[in-house]
């Protein structure tokens, strides 16, 4: 291995894993996260509708966590970090 090859290899950006290059893997895992977020959201929502009471702190925490799961699923599906590639010359 020539010395100039070793220097260029250390400057190269690390390659993404095989998971992020697979569209079907991203769609399945993103859909699973969105589905779990909807399931978590429907728990406290059902209680609030049945009892006709305002949400308590635990229910607000569950709903916030559910929206976090849904957003995470959307981010996994669209993969915005993979589209922001810098051209280094």
Image (tube, helix red, strand yellow):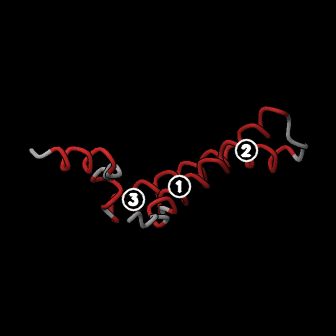
Residue 45: give x, y in percent of width and height.
75, 49
Q: Which mark is residue 64?
A: 2
Query: What residue does disc 3 label?
Result: 26
Alpha-carbon distance for marks 3 and 1?
9 Å
SS label for mark 3: helix
Callout 2 secondary element: helix
Residue marked by disc 1: 73
Disc 2 residue crowd, few under 14, some 14–19, many 20+, Cα 10 Å: some
| Quadrant occupied by the C terminus | bottom left
Q: Residue at x 29, y 44 (%)?
A: 10
40 or 7: nearer the viewer: 7
**Horizontally, is 1 left or right of 55 in the view?**
left
SS at badge 1: helix
The residue drawn where x is 75% and y is 37% is 61
Extreme-top residue of the structure: 58
Q: Nearer the viewer, residue 68 or 89?
A: 89
Residue reaching furthest front? 3
Q: From what the image shows, is residue 67 above or below residue 24? A: above
| 62 sits to left or right of 86 | right
At horizontal 20% and vertical 49% (from top left) the residue drawn is 4
Q: Crowdedness of circle 3 by 10 Å Cα count: few (<14), some, many (20+)? A: many
28 or 47: nearer the viewer = 28
Which mark is first along the chain, 1 or 3?
3
Give the residue at x 62% y 44%: 40
The answer to whether 85 is drawn above or below residue 55 in the figure is below
Task: Give neighbour class at mark 1: few <14, some 14-19, many 20+ (Cα, 10 Å).
Answer: many
Residue 25 lies, in percent from the top left, at 34, 58
Q: Work out which quarter of the rendered image holds the N terminus and state it.
A: top left
The alpha-carbon separation of the residues under discs 2 and 1 comes to: 14 Å
Decide: marks 3, 2 in contact (CB < 8 A)?
no
* Label 3, label 2: how far apart the Cα atoms are: 23 Å
Sequence-wise first label, 2 or 1: 2
């Amino acid at each position: 291995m020539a010395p100039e090859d070793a220097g260029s290899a250390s400057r190269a950006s690390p390659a993404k894993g095989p998971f992020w290059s697979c569209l079907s893997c991203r769609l399945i895992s993103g859909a699973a996260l969105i589905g779990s977020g909807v399931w978590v959201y429907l728990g406290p929502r059902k209680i609030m509708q049945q009892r006709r009471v305002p949400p308590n702190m635990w229910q607000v925490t569950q709903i916030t966590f559910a929206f976090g799961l849904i957003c995470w699923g959307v981010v996994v599906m669209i993969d915005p970090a993979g589209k922001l590639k810098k051209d280094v010359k």
